[in-house]
Image (cartoon, grey):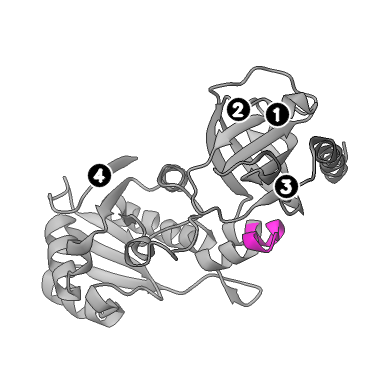
Amino acid sequence: MRVFRGHTRPVPSPVVLAIGNFDGVHRGHAALVKRLTEMGGLLGLPATVLTFEPHPREFFSPNSAPARLTTLREKLELLAESGVNQVMISRFNAAFAKLSAEEFIEQVLVRGLRTRHLIIGDDFRFGSGRTGDFQLLQVAGERLGFSVEAMDSVRLCHERVSSSGVRKALACGDMELAAGLLGRPYIIDGQVTHGDKIGRQLGFATANLRIKHNPLPMTGVFAVEVGGLGAQPLPGVANLGIRPTVGGTRPLLEVHLFDFNRDIYGAHISVRFVHKLRDEQRFPNFDALKAQIAADAAAARAYFKL
């Protein structure tokens, strides 16, 4: 999959295009991407996604924007796995935010991306003041030479699948619902780094991942499966949070793998959160923390029937 930054230079060929933030790349996004790749094949044009960095809500409300479900790297990996041919990453800044709907169509869709067919979600709005909609795109497309279609939302148990719905499920600790909305378990990818070895001192060595998600979409202790270390995912227990008992302030993901003693520093792993065990909490001393970690590990083993 090719990745381009910006939208002002014309792309090598006309495109079939989908536009959105694609945070989490959930089942609704997957349905849109499936249609995108189908149309790309029919028209013989690259299936292309236009997304934004930072997320528009981070630009407009930096102190109250919702937690991201995926980092940019994770989002690009998921889009590549879905069959997207190329992704255009547009910098969402003051100049971009000021574009009127008409300017967005002419400067971005037509001159920049040479769009031949556009696919949008049924809630898509664009341009300064969110004045652009499906009807405006249809009229402009007839004049400027591109077609447009809007896809209905995907629903699960009569509820619309959305990034905000996934965030709510994660915040409530409902990992099963989150997996249903995403079409897979919630995953955090990262490189294993050296930590302060506190887990090893407590008898539970951990693989530590520095987290780029800030704020975190959830915190707590979870039963997890870890990919990237063999043919099959490995079961374990993980703490995601700031570790208040040891005075932590930065988000950290600590994973203890069951019956595993390999050196994996530097490895890139995928941590799949399959079941929440409890909230993160502060303990009065290390003995209390050690006892709770042992109980958490036992609960996770019971979940996996180990």
Task: Tell me if label 3 and label 4 are in contact, CB under 8 Å.
Answer: no
* Point 81% across, 39% down: residue: 293
Q: Which mark is residue 221?
A: 3
* Point 84% across, 46% down: residue: 303
Q: Which mark is residue 195?
A: 2
**Disc 2, SS:** loop
Closer to the camera in the image, 250 or 156? 250
Residue 220's x, y, as percent?
69, 50
Residue identifier under label 4 = 4
Q: Residues within 10 Å of mark 3 (few under 14, many from 20)?
A: many
Q: CA distance from mark 3 to mark 2?
A: 18 Å
Query: Horizontally, is 255 left or right of 284 in the view?
Result: left
Residue identifier under label 1 = 198
* Point 20% across, 67% down: residue: 146
Q: CA distance from mark 1 to mark 3?
A: 16 Å
**Disc 3, SS:** strand
Look at the image and say whether residue 154 sits in the magenta stretch: no
Q: CA distance from mark 4 to mark 1?
A: 42 Å
Residue 27's x, y, as percent?
54, 60
Residue type marked 2: Gly
Q: Which mark is residue 15?
A: none
Which quarter of the picture shows residue 17?
Answer: bottom left
Task: Tell me if label 1 and label 3 are in contact, CB under 8 Å.
Answer: no
Question: Reading the chain from its start, which is encountered first: label 1 or label 3?
Answer: 1
The number of numbered discs placed on residues in the rendered structure image is 4
Closer to the camera in the image, 300 or 150? 300
